[in-house]
Image (tube, rainbow, N blue to C red):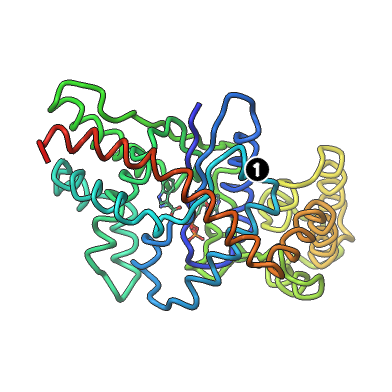
Amino acid sequence: MRILTGIQASGKPHLGNILGAIMPAVELSKQPGNDSFLFIADLHTLTSLKDGESIRSNTLSIAAAWLAFGFDTEKNYFYRQSKLAAYHTELMWYLNCFTPFPMLANAHSFKDKSDKLSDVNAGLFTYPVLQAADIVLYDAQIIPVGKDQRQHIEMTRDIANSVNKRYNKAIFVLPEARINEEVMTIPGLDGAKMSKSLNNYIDIFLPEKDLLKQIKKIVTDTTPLEEPKNPDNDITFKLYQLMASPAQVAEMRANYEAGGYGYGHAKQALHELMLGYFKEAREKFDYFIAHPEIIEEKLAIGEKKVQPIAEATIARIRAEFKF
Ligand code: ADP
Ligand code: TRP
């Protein structure tokens, strides 16, 4: 199977990105018979971030995170979208001409973003078409993403399918979203979806003390320490559950329900759990951040490797237009 997923260079990857996207994608990439395309969607990033230094440093931290979680760049494909911009944007233009205007106008993500952001640019509007190009350019079959991306993948299928129908041949592969149901939406510090843009995220790569400080910001109710608590309403417990073993979860649940166990204790336990769970990844991340030249080299190799695949797809669609 051909797997593909992208992540925007709009910040350092947080716990939501890692559990929701990076870890499942790396897992899939390890299965024999799969080849995986993992890329930094830095063209998409421009819809919300214009500062080049920030884009560059976010790109490095995202790449370091994928490497830290064991993504094998020799077996797979690892690249920046901007380094293949000519292919991605050319294909996007063609797909634009097959995309009904109302499909974009009714997209959830556009509605959300245009309500929230002050800079409502045309890039935000056509964002799903660039994403469709990212996907069909490499004949991707499976797209591991978080739940919020489901509609974008459906739009990709619809657009690709209109092209195939119009020319009556399978020019593009129709992709399928792979959504990990268990970790569909990782809650943030305030209980809303953990997100860079909401600034409610946990950065697992912070030094130990700073990580604890961040965990302490998780919102709780005001049940006093001595009283029993309902774990299922609590954000700290929800996060703990995502990384703990069944025995650890059962023990934590009992602590909450017994009383005499405060949210502060639970947060300490979450901190400890995370330091253990991410020990190796944290060490590797620091190593790659200290050696950006290694990251650069791996990306440059990947960018060379994907180029002929992109070129072949472009040739296939151009042929239909006699371009
Ligand atoms: P953010 O929402 O922080 O801006 P992105 O939109 O760059 O993150 O998301 C990158 C990937 O991580 C996508 O596949 C997205 O669905 C996934 N993801 C982001 N936040 C979460 C979350 N809170 N829970 C599950 N998956 C998430
Ligand atoms: N829109 C995705 C996000 O915000 C990032 C992305 C861009 C992507 N192109 C993609 C994801 C192609 C999967 C496939 O998370």
Q: Residue 298 in the image: state x and y as whole percent.
A: 59, 54
Write down the quadrant of residue 170 in the picture: top left
Describe residue 161's horizontal placement relative to residue 312 as left or right. Answer: left
Question: In what element is the residue under mark 1?
Answer: loop
Say if 176 sits above or below 200 in the image. Answer: above
Q: Which of 162 and 228 is in front in this view?
A: 162
Identify the residue at image location x=37%, y=60%.
Answer: 44
> Amino acid type of disc 1?
Asp
Quadrant of the image containing the C terminus: top left
Relative height, residue 208 to residue 181 (above, below): below
Please state the horizontal and vertical placement of residue 262, each as a whole percent of the image: 83, 64
Tell how many labels.
1
Instruction: Please name the residue shown 55% across and 43% down the image.
Output: 184
Q: Residue furthest left?
A: 322
Q: Which of 138 and 263 is in front in this view?
A: 138
Q: Residue 16, how many percent across, how many down?
A: 59, 55
* Residue at x-position 20% and y-position 21%: 169
* Location of mark 1 (residue): 72
**Left or right: residue 115 compared with residue 197:** left
At x 53% / y 57%, what residue is drawn? 193
